Amino acid sequence: MTSRDYANRKPTRKGNANKRGSKRDQPKRFPYLLLLITIAGLAGFGYLLWLLNSTDEAVTTPVIVEAPKKTTVKKDPNALPPAPQEEWTYLEELENKKVEVDLPAVSTKPKRPYQMQCGSFRKESQANSLKAIIAFQGLEAQVRKVKGTSGIWYKVVLGPYDKKREAERHRHVLQNSGTNGCQIWFWESS
């Protein structure tokens, strides 16, 4: 391997030294845009100060208003106010008015109680399994055997409920446990 002599070697510039107009060689330009923005800002600030000064003078200039002359009128302390000019008749009409209200008879029990049906199955074992799921929620269900036009059905029914609100509350309990599709109807005895 040959040894190189770095001491007598001329230093090379990084990049291309043959380029004309490199940044080092160009004289710096005067920043006209920066000067223009600065002058505009100072002019705007001066205008703002002049505007505030001119409106301040208008506000602080006192306006002289002549006060009207007061005339004194002596009033009698025992004098009554003048009588009202309008006469109201609604007070007499309300005193003599009779209102008749027709209230329907309020019954505490509905004519028919409610029931909630949660399923209808062809097989009794399926109906009994749904009845067991409902029993785990703390509700009591019944399985009814019904003969229909298409054969025998096993319906899972809860109730009777005197109020529909109570049936709705039990339906929400079942929905929270994952048993959906329960319908509330009037009670049908079979």
Image (cartoon, helix red, strand yellow):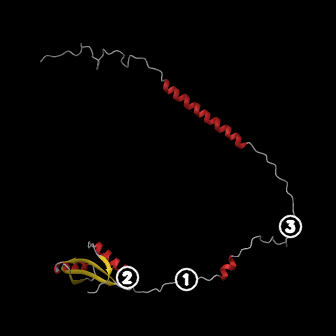
In the image: residue 111, left or right of residue 40? left
Q: Position of residue 142 (x, y in %)?
A: 24, 84
Q: Which mark is on residue 163?
A: 2
Give the label, 1 or 2, closer to the camera. Answer: 1
Quarter of the image where one finds residue 5: top left
Residue holding disc 3: 75
Residue 172, label in figure: none
> Is there a contact, CB below 8 Å, between mark 3 and mark 2?
no
- How many residues crowd mark 3 within 10 Å: few (<14), some (14–19), many (20+)? few
60 displayed left or right of 69? left
Numbered disc 1: secondary structure = loop
Image-quadrant location for residue 139:
bottom left
Q: Secondary structure at mark 2?
A: loop
Viewer-side residue, 186 vs 126: 186
Mark 3 vs mark 2: which is more N-terminal?
3
Mark carried by residue 101: 1
Residue reaching furthest left? 1
17, 182: nearer the viewer: 182
At label 2, the amino acid type is Lys
